[in-house]
Image (tube, rainbow, N blue to C red):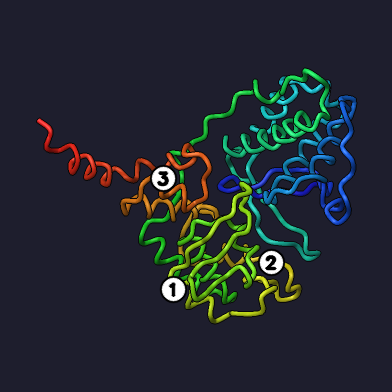
Amino acid sequence: MATSETSAGDGVVSGSTTQTGSSAAAASPPPIPLRAGHMAMPDVIDLYMAHYAGRDDTRAQRLGWWREQLAAIALQDLTDDHVHAALEALATQPARYWSGKDADGRSIFKAKRRTLAPATVNRYGASLAAVVTWAIKRRVAPKGFIHPCRSVERRVERNERTRYLSDDERYRLLDACRQSTWPRLYVLVLMALTTGARKSELISLRWSDVDLDRCVAHVGRTKNGDPRVLPLVPAVIDELRRFSAGPSVLLFPSARRVDTAFTFEPRWLEALKRARIRGFTFHALRHSCASMLAQSGATLLEIADVLGHRQMQMTKRYSHLATTHKAALVQRILGGIK
């Protein structure tokens, strides 16, 4: 049986249901063998996930897909041709989106008309590259092993199509969220829109991470492994005070299992429909935050700091939105030169 993975802006793609690394998290990770190039790639992936301490909750799903593609290949035999062929096939698959659950509680995914975006394919390539890099650094790979992912060209990402909300769409969406049957949808969306935080960062927050008096929330470790502080605007603080609970409780808990985040996606899709907004994902709230900052004069460095970007290349997709600010800057400093 196949499972699926959600990816910002691109829906989902089939992967393995193998719980790579999940069961190992509770026990001590297995020892790392020395120069074990004969290991099959699925075993290398499982070993990597058993030792993985990052916060990327989609990595196991992507690597589950790689387990299937490289099932019969040993680490020492892995070449760039294997990686290239797998990613080429992946790029032809249709993107899918989550559309709720069936009567048995299983997720339902529907295919979109377009194929997976280049950014999604690149993320799959990056997940395998991380495994191989780890195997080389930890001396699992044979001596002199050449990293097969480094000679596979990344796809050009269509960042110019980054979707963000117009002012009118933003008003309609927030109004629709206020009307949701789940009372915390409004504050969740407002936090995403005003902090630029990722969904995984927000739904993992507990009340012990939030300081309402100082108006901040602490993300212990981001997807990139860095500590991060989220400034909270007054409207968010006011809303959060309505739901304040014990330190160990999640901000957005399930009604049935308080230690599990609420599955808010159906309510989110209902709000989008009520607001008459199409072609928009929850992750795009992060883009909307960046776009509002850029259009209000924030520098790319400031936007990168808010979003938690390590590389400025990720932030440059918003540079075209800051043209007015750049023009004013040039005129102020250089306008008097003759």
Q: Residue at x 52, y 71 (%)?
A: 187
Secondary structure beneath label 2: loop
Q: Secondary structure at mark 1?
A: helix
Taking depth in this image into account, of 85 and 261 the one nearest to the observer is 261
The disc labelled 3 sits on which kind of residue? Leu
Disc 3 target residue: 301
Estimate how packed mark 1 is, as few (under 14), some (14 to 19) or many (20 or more) residues with alpha carbons within 10 Å: few
Say which of marks 2 and 1 sits in front: 1
Q: Amino acid at mark 1?
A: Ala
Residue at point 53%, 60% (across, down):
229
Disc 3 + disc 1, Cβ < 8 Å:
no
Point out the tag, 3 or 1, that comes first from the N-terminus.
1
Identify the mark nearer the N-term, 2 or 1: 1
Q: Nearer the viewer, residue 308 or 214?
A: 214
Against 272, residue 326 (above or below) is above
The residue carrying pointer 3 sits among few (fewer than 14), some (14 to 19) or many (20 or more) residues within 10 Å by Cα, namely few
Q: Is residue 279 visible?
A: no
Q: Are marks 2 and 1 in contact (CB under 8 Å)?
A: no
Task: Name the residue rendered at 84%, 41% in the picture.
Answer: 46
- The amino acid on which the numbered mark 2 sits, given as a three-letter code, is Ala
Task: Compute the Cα span from label 3 to label 2.
Answer: 32 Å
Please name the residue that numbered disc 1 is placed on: 235
Residue denoted by label 2: 261
Looking at the picture, how far across and down is residue 126, in whole percent?
66, 35
* Residue farthest along the left direction in this orientation: 338
* Residue 161 in the image, given as x and y percentages of width and height: 45, 41
Say whether residue 337 is left or right of residue 42: left
**Image position, residue 9 (x, y; %):** 56, 47
Which dot, 3 or 1, sits closer to the camera?
3
